[in-house]
Each structure stands twice: as structure tokens, then as C-alpha cells.
């Protein structure tokens, strides 16, 4: 079976993504995650670029890698000096990695107008750098920067750069679509020509400026390229790099190509790295996204239940993901019946209560509710529709007071049985104050709610053209340390919508306590 090596640049190219700033600890965590996943090479950064990377290269030496090799990244020597006089190359060697990757210009425009040197000197810069690093016992990869644009501008010179790198001893020559604007047919034509002149391993490094990075990487492999570079979630400068979490499973599952990657860890690693990056993993990301194997339409759900192949290209468990069926106005009765089974309700699709629940869902979704992510609120809806709902407390009234430059305040009065309680609390923001006041009040009767922590809060304006009277949808995600659930509130008043969602969150927890006898 043919094998392709996977080279991850999350720590270097990915760090150039807007909004991403890795600490040394972050980078060490990502190294461990990628090593566990099984990528061949981890591009750890440029040791000459900043103090943080210098510190990282010292700290990473303490980690014993099981699967991956670390790579230090740098550039060819500066013009008109010797390699041993170049501070950047000295830093590259001091990083003490067995493999180094250097980039060099292959586009005559960049040589003449960015480096401000001659075409001949640029070839010497490539040659001298590789020879110097090889003489210091390093395996050298050569990133042919701007290669595809360079080839289109001056194919002879671009190819001469590759030949120079090969003759100097580069073990892999990587063709870079640095501006990310190369079309598939152009890439195919150029790679076929490159293969006539280059005998060492060829790699591909693509950017996503026209949304072709993954497709072009796959095309390159189909043409015999055996080394693929990218970032794990496709993060990177501008619109990002080729997404390895899409490329790797496609190579392995669709093209019968071997890599060292453990596909069962694909989704777990994506969630882990997204968290370290302080970003939300896009739901619609192929293979690893929450929606990658999620079904909403009734006919689709029915088809998947009869045969998963009807609407899924692979078994989600292969990549560590899972199948989900959504509750919505377009979901069929079969979906509702399966949800009801979870609550001990074994009914038929013709049962009037099932029909009534579906009609209620449609009515609420028309008002702006959406139960796809709000499993907590959906459970409460079932309890109410089927006589399982218990009223743990009654809200008498609440009031929120906003203070400019000060903490906001909230006052809540609730009734439990024949007892009344009034509680006030302050918080950063009116919703925060309201949440604190409600919890403090309910804790007097139900101490178990102390475990609840609000971990996410999402607001969406549903009909912005109505101005201040627009309908607002609020999703609140809560956890008790063991379980996590999401609830929803809808209103023309954002505070009221938030309050509805928060009340649902607490009621859902109290129902769970009741069911489990805690």
C-alpha cells in the first residue's frame, strides 16, 4: 500500500491566523496531541522569529515523542553573506531538531522586487543554505515558496530553483501555492512537468484563498506527491491553509493510501486543538464537525436508519465522530418516537400525543425556538406535553437594574409551596446578575443547584429588520461537572429570553435530580 507522510504546520503557519496566539504551554499541548494522533512531522516554529519560540524549543526537548519528528523552520541565508554568518541559520541549528525546513524564493518577481537581489544570487542562497545544513547533519526539506505563481511567470527559473535544491541535497522539495490562487487544472499541469525534472520526494503546501487548498492537496497526491503539508483545522494566514483533518481521512478512506494517523482520534484531536486555539470547531467541518453526521430531514433520518450508507459516506465512528438526529419542524415522526423512548415513552407514530407534540414543535419553531441544540428545553417540553412535568418553584417577579460603570443588580422573588423568598445579587451584566440572583434564591430550597455553572451563552437576533422589537433567541449551556446541557429562550426582550433559558436550565437539572433520586 502506498504511504504518504503528513507534515503539520499548526504551530507555525496556523499561528499566523487572525485571533490565534499560542503560549508556550499551548504549543506543548498541541505537540502532544499531534504526536498521539500520529502525524509524521510537526513544524514547531521558527526559532529565530521570537523569544517565545526560543523558549518553546527548550521546553519541547523534555517531551518524548512516540510518533512524530519535530521540524525547525527557517529561510535561506540572507543575500551576500556566508551561511555560517547568518544568525537565523545559527538559531535553526541551535533548535537541535534532526529535520529542518527552509523556504526559498522560486518566483523571479519576489527575487528581484522583494529580496532585491539577482536571480543568480538567489540560486546560490538556496544551494549554500542546504549544503551548510547538510554539513551539520540535518535532514533538509525545501519549501519552494510561491512556486506555482513563479512557474506561471517563468517556468525555467522556477524549475532551476528546484533542481538547485535537489542537487544541494534536499530530501523533500515542497511545491507551495503561497498565495492560494492556483486552480486544479493548473496545478495538475505544473506538477506533471515538475516530475520530469525532480527525482527526490515531492511535497505539496497549499493555501485556501479560493477554497481549493484541500482539493489541490488531494489532486497533488493523486499525481504521485508523497508529502502533504497543512494545519490541523485549516487555520492560517488570510483564509487559512490546507485542512489536514479533511485531507488525511480522505487519503486513507477514499484513496487507500496509508498514513501513520490514528483515524479514531481524528475528532477528539480536532476538539482538543480547537479548544487550545480558543475557537469554536465549525459544526459543518467535514469528518470532525458536530454536524458532519447529523440528520434533520425526516426522509434522510428514515433512510439512515434503514441503511447508514443512504446519507453517510462513511461510518462516523471510524473518525471518532457520532451520528445525531435533530428535532425540528422538518423531522419525521420516527425521530420524535426515538427521542420519546429516551424518556420511557414507547408510543406509535399515530398516537394523538405524538401528533400533538409535533404540532407544538412546529408552533414553537415558528415563534423562533429551535430545539436542535437545546436538548434540555426539549426534554422539558416532553415532560409538559406528556404530564411528566413538575413545577419545582413559581416565579413571583424579577427586576433587573443596570448601573453605568457599576455592577448590575437583580432582585427575584419565588414561591416554593407556602414559602416565599426574595434575593438580590450583583453581576457583570444584567444577565449575569439575574443568573446569580435566581440561583441564590433556588439554592435555599434545592442546594443541589450549586453545582450548576453556566459555560456558554449565545444570542441571535432573528428578525433584525424590526429594530428594537426584533425577536431574540438565547441559548444557554450549563454543566454540573458530570453532564452538560443546553436550553433556549425566545422573546423580543433579550433579558426575558435569557431568563427563560436560565430557568429551563435549572428546571432540567431539578428533574434529573428527581429522576435519579439524588
Image: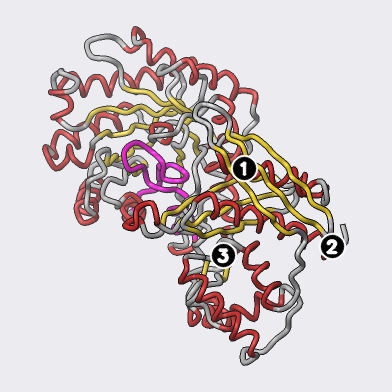
Mark 2 or 3, which is nearer the eye?
2
* Spatial separation of the CA atoms under disc 2 and disc 3: 31 Å
Q: Residue at x 42, y 34 (%)?
A: 19
What residue is disc 3 on? Answer: 316
Q: Residues within 10 Å of mark 2 (few under 14, many from 20)?
A: few
Disc 2 secondary structure class:
helix
Q: Residues within 10 Å of mark 3 (few under 14, many from 20)?
A: some
| Residue 267 coordinates in the image, percent (x, y) | 56, 53
Scheme of image coloration: secondary structure
> In the rendered image of this protein, does residue 210 appear above or below residue 254?
above
Task: Answer with the quarter of the image where residue 33 lies.
Answer: top right
Q: Is residue 243 magenta?
A: yes
What's the mark number on residue 516? 2
Disc 1 secondary structure class:
helix
Residue 495 versus residue 348: which sits nearer the camera?
A: 495
Q: Residue at x 31, y 26 (%)?
A: 168
The tag earlier along the polypeptide, 1 or 3, is 1
- From which residue to which does the magenta span run? 224-252
Q: Is residue 477 left or right of residue 172?
A: right
| Residue 402 coordinates in the image, percent (x, y) | 53, 36
What residue is disc 1 on? Answer: 36
Amino acid at each position: 500500500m502506498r504511504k504518504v507522510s503528513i507534515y503539520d504546520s499548526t504551530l507555525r503557519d496556523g499561528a499566523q491566523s487572525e485571533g490565534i496566539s499560542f503560549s508556550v504551554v499551548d504549543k506543548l499541548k498541541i505537540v502532544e496531541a499531534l504526536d498521539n494522533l500520529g502525524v509524521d512531522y510537526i513544524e514547531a516554529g521558527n526559532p529565530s522569529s521570537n523569544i517565545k519560540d526560543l523558549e518553546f524549543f527548550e521546553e519541547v526537548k523534555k517531551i518524548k515523542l512516540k510518533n512524530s519528528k519535530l521540524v525547525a523552520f527557517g529561510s535561506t541565508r540572507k543575500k551576500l553573506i556566508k551561511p555560517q554568518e547568518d544568525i537565523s541559520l545559527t538559531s535553526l541549528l541551535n533548535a537541535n531538531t534532526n529535520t529542518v525546513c527552509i523556504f526559498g524564493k522560486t518566483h523571479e518577481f519576489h527575487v528581484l522586487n522583494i529580496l532585491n537581489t539577482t536571480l543568480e544570487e538567489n540560486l546560490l542562497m538556496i544551494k549554500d543554505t542546504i549544503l551548510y545544513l547538510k554539513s551539520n547533519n540535518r535532514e533538509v526539506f525545501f519549501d519552494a515558496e510561491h512556486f506555482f505563481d513563479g512557474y506561471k511567470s517563468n517556468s525555467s527559473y522556477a524549475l532551476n530553483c528546484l533542481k538547485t535544491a535537489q542537487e544541494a541535497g534536499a530530501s523533500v522539495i515542497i511545491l507551495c501555492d503561497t498565495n492560494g490562487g492556483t486552480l486544479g487544472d493548473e496545478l495538475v499541469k505544473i506538477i506533471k512537468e515538475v516530475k520530469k525534472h525532480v527525482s527526490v520526494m515531492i511535497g505539496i503546501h497549499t493555501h485556501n484563498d479560493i477554497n481549493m487548498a484541500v482539493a489541490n492537496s488531494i489532486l497533488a497526491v493523486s499525481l504521485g506527491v508523497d508529502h502533504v503539508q497543512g494545519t490541523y483545522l485549516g487555520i492560517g494566514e488570510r483564509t487559512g491553509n490546507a485542512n489536514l483533518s479533511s485531507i488525511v481521512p480522505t487519503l486513507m478512506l477514499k484513496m487507500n493510501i496509508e498514513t501513520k494517523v490514528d483515524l479514531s482520534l481524528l475528532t477528539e484531536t480536532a476538539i482538543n486543538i480547537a479548544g487550545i486555539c480558543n475557537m469554536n470547531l465549525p459544526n459543518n467541518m467535514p469528518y470532525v464537525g458536530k454536524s458532519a453526521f447529523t440528520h434533520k430531514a425526516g426522509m434522510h433520518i428514515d433512510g439512515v436508519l434503514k441503511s447508514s450508507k443512504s446519507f453517510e459516506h462513511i461510518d462516523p465512528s471510524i473518525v471518532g465522530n457520532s451520528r445525531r438526529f435533530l428535532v425540528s419542524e422538518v423531522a419525521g415522526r420516527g425521530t420524535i418516537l426515538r427521542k420519546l423512548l429516551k424518556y420511557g415513552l414507547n408510543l406509535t407514530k399515530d398516537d394523538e400525543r405524538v401528533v400533538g407534540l409535533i404540532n407544538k414543535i412546529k408552533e414553537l419553531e415558528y415563534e423562533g425556538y429551535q430545539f436542535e441544540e437545546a436538548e434540555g428545553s426539549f426534554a422539558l417540553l416532553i415532560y409538559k406535553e406528556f404530564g411528566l412535568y413538575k413545577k419545582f418553584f413559581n416565579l413571583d417577579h424579577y427586576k433587573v437594574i443596570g448601573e453605568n460603570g457599576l455592577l448590575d443588580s437583580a432582585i427575584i422573588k419565588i414561591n416554593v409551596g407556602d414559602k416565599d423568598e426574595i434575593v438580590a445579587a450583583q453581576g457583570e451584566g444584567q444577565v449575569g446578575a439575574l443568573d446569580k440572583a435566581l440561583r441564590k434564591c433556588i439554592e435555599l430550597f434545592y442546594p443541589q443547584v450549586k453545582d450548576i455553572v453556566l459555560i456558554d451563552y449565545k444570542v441571535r437576533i432573528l428578525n433584525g429588520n424590526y429594530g428594537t422589537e426584533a425577536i431574540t433567541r438565547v441559548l444557554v449551556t450549563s454543566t454540573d461537572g458530570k453532564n452538560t446541557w443546553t436550553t433556549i429562550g425566545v422573546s423580543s426582550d433579550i433579558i426575558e429570553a435569557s431568563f427563560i433559558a436560565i430557568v429551563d436550565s435549572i428546571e432540567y437539572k431539578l428533574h434529573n435530580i428527581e429522576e435519579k433520586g439524588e
